[in-house]
Image (spheres, rainbow, N blue to C red):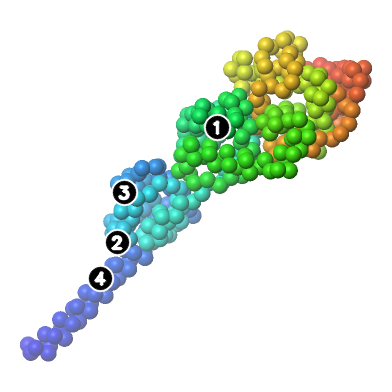
Amino acid sequence: MNLKKIITIFSVLLITGLIVYGYILYRDIFGANTKFSENEVYIYIPTDSDYEAVKKIVTPYIDNMSRFEMVANKKSYPDRAEKAGRFILKKGMNSNEIVNALRINIPVNLAFNNQERLENFAGRIGSQIEADSLSLLTAFKDKKFLEENGFTEENVLSMFVPNSYEFFWNTNANKFRDKMSKEYRKFWTDARLEKAKLLNLTPIQVSILASIVHKETVKRDERPKVAGVYLNRLQRGIKLEADPTVIYAVKLKSGDFNQVIKRVLYKDLETDSPYNTYKYEGLPPGPIAMPDITALEAVLNPEKHNYIYFCASVTNFGYHEFAVTTAQHEVNRQKYVAWVNQQGIKR
């Protein structure tokens, strides 16, 4: 065989080898490498996870780990310092796309409202981000934080204004708390602070009163009117006598916040608790729930009237009957009591 033929054969073999190698490389990098039926899945990688931990987490979703590791090494993913977060993998992704996806931390949209206690709120948030409820609760109750920001354990719930917020899943408890503190200060604009001042209330007191308004009525259009009643009582030195505060006091005393109380009994009014506004004058020491923004705005922009009393309406369900005099209120109250008895509501 002459030299020319040898060179030709060698060249053909080399080209063939390069083509095969190129195909394999292309397949390894750009061939589909997922094995889940859903269109997309979310991958959660805990804080301080190393490359080995990441591989264990993604293994159930990747068809060929050797291909993935080859690409990951070529793209220096194992050397990446920060690997924690929430990531999205889509069906049919190739190894290159998977590695790229593991570099993009997808934020979580947090939403919360109407949490009755700090413990409930911590549990709600702990189910949506990496920080667990215990670490969140510890951060919320940190004495130094409370002192520096003017809160107490009883009223710090007022710092969390219900809305939709964007957080990275791997946000720790302190960072979550600190960001919510910034959002709280952002909510209390100069205009809102001035309105609170004109009512002779602090932002915390506005939140406490708003929590009562929030619990009294689900009708947003009625909240300014209800807020007006309570502000009238406060300004005249009359006890608030708000049923939701009694219900909260009863639950707090029993430790059972899951119980359903549809009817406040006379014995409930004797519950000895600073949250019982039938027994103690003024506002309770903290919110009885997390008021939403409409309740906060209702307190800041109350309806001006002379009403001192209100009672649930039996003709316009969901709304209330308002009264200026004790006599008129008693007429409304008796109508409601008769309706409750007719419905057989004992508790």
Query: Mark 3 — residue?
Result: 51
N-terminal label among 1 and 3: 3
Q: Amino acid at mark 3?
A: Tyr
Q: What's the residue at 58%, 45% (across, down)?
A: 165
Query: Mark 2 — residue?
Result: 74
The 10 Å Cα crowd at callout 2, few under 14, some 14 to 19, many 20 or more, is: few
> Which of the two residues, 57 or 220, is positioned nearer the viewer here?
220
The 10 Å Cα crowd at callout 1, few under 14, some 14 to 19, many 20 or more, is: few
Residue 239, located in which quarter of the rendered image?
top right
Query: Mark 1 — residue?
Result: 148
Q: Amino acid at mark 1?
A: Glu
Find the distance from the CA under tag 2 to the CA under tag 4.
Answer: 16 Å
The 10 Å Cα crowd at callout 4, few under 14, some 14 to 19, many 20 or more, is: few
N-terminal label among 2 and 1: 2
N-terminal label among 3 and 2: 3
Find the distance from the CA under tag 1 to the CA under tag 3.
Answer: 40 Å
Q: Position of residue 12 (x, y in %)?
A: 20, 82
Marks 2 and 1 close (CB-CB < 8 Å) = no
Reply above or below: 70 against 126.
below
Q: Position of residue 234 (x, y in %)?
A: 79, 24
Q: What's the residue at 23%, 77% (across, down)?
A: 16
Find the distance from the CA under tag 2 to the CA under tag 1.
Answer: 49 Å
SS under mark 4 = helix
Q: Amino acid at mark 4?
A: Tyr
SS under mark 1 = helix
Query: Mark 4 — residue?
Result: 21
Q: What's the residue at 31%, 48% (across, down)?
A: 51
Marks 2 and 4 close (CB-CB < 8 Å) = no
| Residue 60 visible, this angle | no
N-terminal label among 2 and 4: 4
